[in-house]
């Protein structure tokens, strides 16, 4: 819920206030100053839209309409947020199937706390409808940081078809593919797409749950 910024971790009980202050000072002042953005409310609206679409494919055209800006400005702002290590994107993976999505993208936050601060939502997981999305964001961002810290380079994607078959995370290195499906609710059985396993029979597949996630976040 609160992420892992040092000040937040070191001050239990005051997490939400610290995250709001961090978001206000870092996101809406420092970032805006760096790029001399003239309409900060547009960037704030874009961040909120990205936070609400966490774990879903995003359309620059739709974001432009939501924020009242053009597609080029949306892409510019997202690139700025990436450079500031606030968000990062995953592109869709496509190699074999005709109905694989080829030009789609998802955008995640580097820190769950910042994401929740953007939409002022700090309710506990058991009271939330977005627990699955937060779990997915936590795992993908944590994996990205771990690989970066250990100097391991892998290409990262998600996989989806026009029939809504999906794999949450694909990693590719030296032609080898690893596929990861994330399940917060261990009561629900994870169903791996047969279309994916048929198309990529040599892919390593792992379902990551609250019971085994530590290894996923600690070893390449």
Image (cartoon, rainbow, N blue to C red):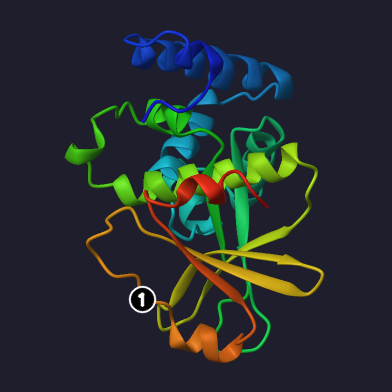
Residue at x 53% of width, y 85% of height: 197
Give above or below for 149 relative to 94: above
Residue at x 49% of width, y 80% of height: 161
Q: Quadrant of residue 209?
A: bottom left
Q: How many marks?
A: 1
Q: Quadrant of residue 81?
A: top right
x, y percent for residue 127: 17, 38
- Depth check, front residue: 84 or 136: 136
Q: Quadrant of residue 90?
A: bottom right
Q: Residues within 10 Å of mark 1 (few under 14, many from 20)?
A: few
From where the camera sits, is residue 139 visible?
Answer: yes
Give above or below for 127 relative to 166: above
Left or right: 4 with respect to 122? right
Left or right: 144 with respect to 117? right
- Depth check, front residue: 109 or 198: 198
x, y percent for residue 205: 54, 72
Q: Quadrant of the N terminus?
A: top left
The residue that mark 1 highlights is: 191
x, y percent for residue 198: 54, 91
Residue at x 19% of width, y 40% of height: 126
Asked which secondary structure carries label 1, the reply is loop
- Depth check, front residue: 20 or 6: 6
Give above or below for 56 relative to 129: below
In the image as oriented, which residue stretches furthest toward the left? 127
Residue at x 54% of width, y 49% of height: 215
From where the camera sits, is residue 74 visible?
Answer: no
- Depth check, front residue: 35 or 21: 21
x, y percent for residue 218: 60, 43
């Amino acid at each position: 819920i609160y992420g892992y910024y040092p000040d937040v971790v070191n001050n239990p009980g005051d997490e939400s206030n610290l995250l709001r202050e961090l978001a206000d000072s870092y996101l809406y002042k420092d970032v805006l100053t760096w790029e001399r953005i003239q309409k900060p409310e547009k960037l704030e609206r874009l961040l909120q839209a990205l936070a609400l679409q966490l774990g879903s494919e995003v359309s620059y055209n739709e974001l432009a309409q939501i924020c009242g800006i053009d597609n080029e400005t949306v892409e510019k702002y997202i690139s700025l947020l990436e450079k500031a290590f606030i968000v990062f994107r995953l592109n869709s993976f496509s190699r074999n199937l005709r109905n694989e999505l080829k030009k789609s993208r998802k955008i995640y936050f580097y820190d769950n706390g910042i994401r929740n601060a953007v939409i002022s939502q700090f309710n506990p997981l058991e009271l939330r409808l977005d627990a699955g999305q937060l779990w997915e964001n936590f795992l993908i961002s944590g994996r990205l940081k771990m690989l970066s810290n250990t100097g391991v380079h892998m290409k990262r994607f998600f996989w989806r078809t026009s029939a809504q078959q999906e794999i949450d995370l694909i990693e590719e290195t030296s032609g080898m593919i690893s596929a990861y499906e994330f399940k917060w609710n261990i009561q629900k059985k994870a169903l791996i797409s047969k279309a994916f396993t048929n198309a990529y029979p040599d892919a390593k597949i792992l379902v990551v749950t609250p019971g085994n996630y530590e290894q996923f976040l600690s070893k390449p």
